[in-house]
């Protein structure tokens, strides 16, 4: 029997939200596992930086400055990936936003913007990616959701964010079932509190201490710790996994 293979050698991937946080570390992690990566995010120097990091790993990468709410932009990005890197086989959708407001005071614009990016953006990304993958008869997509899809975070007023991440988990299951007999797997990962730039700001330091105290492992996740679960779902090691949501939360949702 062959050993389980977690490598992604010679495969082509696209990562949304690749300019920072989880998306950035996942993009470089896929390169470490052997993949070439199209790095998609809003235009900015961080996007070029992650491309440079991947190239230092002797893998190919291209910067794709695109807003995930643009169906045309996403379609063009996938086309460019296939033209410059090769047939698209892997995708990770990490682009997302978060903010907070009391539900009774939240404006429709604030609610809608979170859903536009976190839900519609994930759907449009999956749609553009799958259109390519389905023609090849093979592909694997991972959507980054959140443990907030399952629980309501104490002290955070984010009904819109929580609802959007719950939608991502169920969207993932729905797409997995639609494409299950056509060679494309779709899974999601739900991180707990993670040490991203959003959670490392001085103004949230006290809140972060509470997050860590509420987590059984006693700390937030490092972005490195999201790479392994992502590679697992993308790799042949997860060939029988589709429609699954993997919670990576340091035990938080056990309490």
Image (cartoon, rainbow, N blue to C red):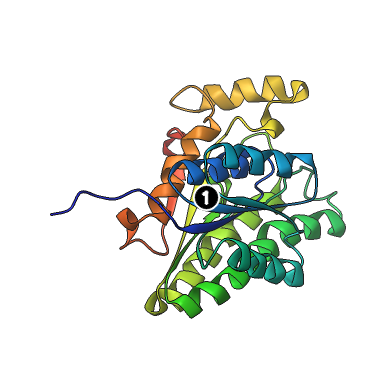
**Furthest residue in direction left, as rendered:** 1
**Left or right: 232 with respect to 113?**
left
Residue 115 visible within the image: yes
Counting every numbered tag in the picture gives 1
Name the residue located 67 percent from the left edge and 34 percent from the top edge: 155
The quarter holding residue 1 reads bottom left
Decide: few, some or many residues near mark 1? Use Cα within 10 Å; few <14, some 14-19, many ≥20: some
Q: Is residue 249 above or below residue 208?
A: below
Q: Return the x and y of residue 249 as percentages of the image width and height.
A: 48, 37
- Judged left or right of residue 255, residue 40 is right
Residue 253 position in % (x across, y down):
46, 39
In this view, the residue in front, 228 or 117, is 228
Question: Could you tell me residue 29's position as x and y percent?
Answer: 50, 41
Q: Could you say which is closer to the camera, residue 84 or residue 160?
A: 84
Residue at 75%, 64% (x, y): give it. 69
Decide which of 189, 30 is in the foreground and name it. 30
Please identify the quadrant where the C terminus is shown: top left
- Place of residue 181 in the rendered image (x, y in percent of width and height, measured from the top left): 38, 79
Is 108 positioned to the left or the right of 63 in the image?
right
In this rendering, the answer to whether 27 lies above or below 1 is: above
In this view, the residue in front, 220 or 20, is 20
- The residue that label 1 is drawn on is 150
């Amino acid at each position: 029997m062959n050993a389980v293979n977690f490598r992604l050698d010679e495969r082509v991937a696209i990562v949304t939200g690749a300019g920072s946080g989880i998306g950035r570390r996942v993009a470089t992690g896929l390169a470490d596992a052997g993949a070439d990566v199209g790095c998609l995010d809003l235009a900015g120097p961080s996007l070029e930086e992650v491309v440079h990091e991947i190239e230092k790993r002797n893998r190919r990468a291209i910067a794709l400055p695109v807003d995930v709410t643009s169906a045309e932009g996403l379609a063009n990005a996938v086309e460019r990936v296939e033209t410059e890197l090769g047939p698209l086989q892997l995708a990770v959708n990490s682009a997302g936003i978060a903010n907070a407001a009391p539900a009774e005071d939240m404006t429709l614009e604030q609610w809608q913007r979170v859903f536009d990016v976190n839900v519609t953006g994930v759907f449009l990304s999956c749609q553009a990616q799958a259109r390519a993958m389905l023609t090849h008869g093979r592909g694997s997509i991972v959507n980054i959701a959140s443990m907030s899809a399952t629980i309501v975070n104490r002290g955070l007023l984010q009904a819109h964010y929580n609802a959007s991440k719950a939608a991502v988990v169920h969207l993932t299951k729905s797409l997995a079932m639609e494409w299950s007999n056509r060679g494309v797997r779709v899974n999601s990962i739900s991180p707990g509190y993670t040490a991203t730039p959003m959670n490392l700001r001085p103004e949230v330091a006290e809140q972060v201490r509470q997050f860590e105290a509420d987590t059984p492992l006693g700390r937030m996740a490092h972005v490195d710790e999201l790479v392994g679960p992502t590679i697992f779902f993308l790799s042949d090691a997860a060939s029988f996994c589709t429609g699954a949501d993997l919670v990576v939360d340091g035990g938080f949702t056990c309490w």
